[in-house]
Image (cartoon, rainbow, N blue to C red):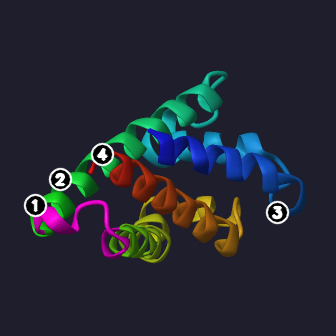
Amino acid sequence: MAGGIAEIVWIGLVAPVSTPDPTAVARGVAEAVIPSLGAGSGAVVLGLAIHMVLALVLGVALAAVLRRALPVERHGSVGEAVLVVSALAIVWAVNFFVVLPMLSPTFLTLVPLWSALVSKLLFGVVAALVFLRSA
């Protein structure tokens, strides 16, 4: 969940220079997942909730895969941190160049690619810190 919160904070901080309406990002998340609810009055809250659920699922999946793939002595290592951040960069690339163009092309206009990439890398850094503490 910490990674998802880091992404929300980042988008909020850079919104004045990168996104005319930061609530449009949350509405865009809702619309990408449930198109019929993207324009409703609760779309911002729904988008934030969907984002956090997806962040939780991603974090748990990442932890499960990496902790099984790496030997115990590598848990909490710099190498694990690099793998975590690299994995999130791959997730960003797949999301922005494969999934979103098919699922919700308009979402791609809401956040500049550089800002979305930094957001996902921050998720990776925060996840790596969580993994380090849990090692």
Residue that label 3 marks: 18
Q: Amino acid at mark 4?
A: Ser
Label 2 sits on a secondary structure element that is helix
Q: Residue furthest top?
A: 41
In the drawing, does residue 3 fall left or right of residue 25?
A: left
Of the two numbered discs 3 and 1 on the same chain, state the one appearing first in sequence: 3
Q: Is residue 26 above or below residue 15?
A: above
Q: Residue furthest right?
A: 16
Sort mark 2 into few (<14), some (14-19) or many (20+) by Cα contacts within 10 Å: few
Q: Which mark is residue 64?
A: 2
Q: Nearer the viewer, mark 3 or mark 1?
A: 1
Residue at mark 1 to residue at mark 4: CA–CA distance = 14 Å
Sort mark 4 into few (<14), some (14-19) or many (20+) by Cα contacts within 10 Å: few
Measuring from the top left, give residue 126's x and y in whole percent: 50, 53
Q: Do callouts 2 and 1 mark residues in contact (Cβ within 8 Å)? A: yes
Measuring from the top left, give residue 19's x and y in whole percent: 80, 57
Residue 86 inside the magenta-drawn segment: no
> Magenta segment range?
71-80
Front position in the image: 31 or 44: 44
Q: Amino acid at mark 1?
A: Arg
Q: Quadrant of residue 88?
A: bottom left
Residue that label 1 marks: 68
Sort mark 1 into few (<14), some (14-19) or many (20+) by Cα contacts within 10 Å: few
Q: Do callouts 4 and 3 mark residues in contact (Cβ within 8 Å)? A: no
Of the two numbered discs 1 and 4 on the same chain, state the one appearing first in sequence: 1
Measuring from the top left, give residue 31's x and y in whole percent: 53, 43
In the drawing, does residue 63 fall left or right of residue 85?
A: left
Of the two numbered discs 4 and 3 on the same chain, state the one appearing first in sequence: 3
Label 1 sits on a secondary structure element that is helix
Q: Amino acid at mark 3?
A: Ser
